[in-house]
Image (cartoon, rainbow, N blue to C red):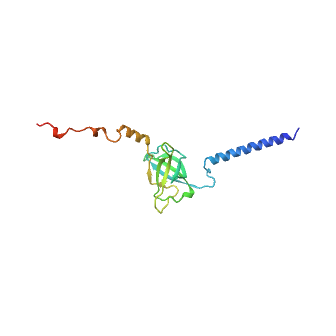
Amino acid sequence: MSIRGPRLEFSVGAFLLLALASLLVLAFASTNRNFGIGKTHYALKASFTNLGQLRVNAPVKVGGVIIGSVKDISLDPQKFTAVVTLDIDGKYNQLSADTSAGILTSGLLGENYVNLSPGGDPDVLKPGDEIAYTTPAVDLIQLVGKYMFSGGGSSPDATKSAPDASQGTTP
């Protein structure tokens, strides 16, 4: 029996473990997430009348910078509004109390995300607080449909001319 056999098996095993570890590192790096390791997060809530295509794990941005993600979406049974729970990175814990939230779209047909616009209030939002000022998503398909079926702006009744009073009949 040759010594070469166990060494070859060990080398192949070590190579496979190294390849698997490299794939895991690549998978973690490509998600741009640290999976909660060493980071603190806090939750904020916001109610919207229309979510559009907003989904769980959608980004939360301030000025185009991602500061968190959508953690949960539920329905308020009393108001029948969508309640969105935002998972905000702990280093952004100085959002003013009058911060507003809106649902925007990346590009013309891109993904929806929550955009936060901080105000000027010296008080800050605390974990679990609700954002009072919200703007729902704009439904582009509905807007296009309204424009198409309304004749492009003016109503069809407004284009009809009324009979001229000066040419009326005399009794």
Q: Find residue 4 and report its image quarter.
A: top right
Residue 166's spot in the image, x, y percent?
16, 40
How many numbered badges does the structure rendering display?
A: 0
Question: Could you tell whether 171 is left or right of 95 in the image?
Answer: left
State the residue at coordinates (30%, 38%). 156
Residue situated in front as seen by the camera: 77 or 123:
123
x and y percent of residue 118 in the render? 48, 57
| Drawn side of residue 153 relative to residue 61, left or right | left
Kindly identify the residue that appears in the image at 74 percent across and 44 percent down: 17
Apparent side of residue 114 relative to residue 160 in the rendered image (left or right): right
Q: In which quarter of the image is the N terminus?
A: top right
Could you say which is closer to the camera, residue 40 or residue 115? 115
Q: Write the residue at 16% across / 38% down.
A: 167
Q: Which residue lies furthest to the bottom in this view?
A: 122
Name, please, the residue furthest toward the right.
Answer: 1
| Picture layout, residue 58 above or below residue 124 | above
Nearer to us in this view, 144 or 101: 144
The outermost residue toward the left is 171
**Position of residue 55 measured from the top left corner of the image (x, y, whole percent):** 52, 44
- Could you tell whether 4 is left or right of 98 in the image? right
Q: Quadrant of the C terminus?
A: top left
For image coordinates 38% across by 40% down, the residue present is 147
Q: Give the image location of residue 106, x and y in percent.
A: 50, 46
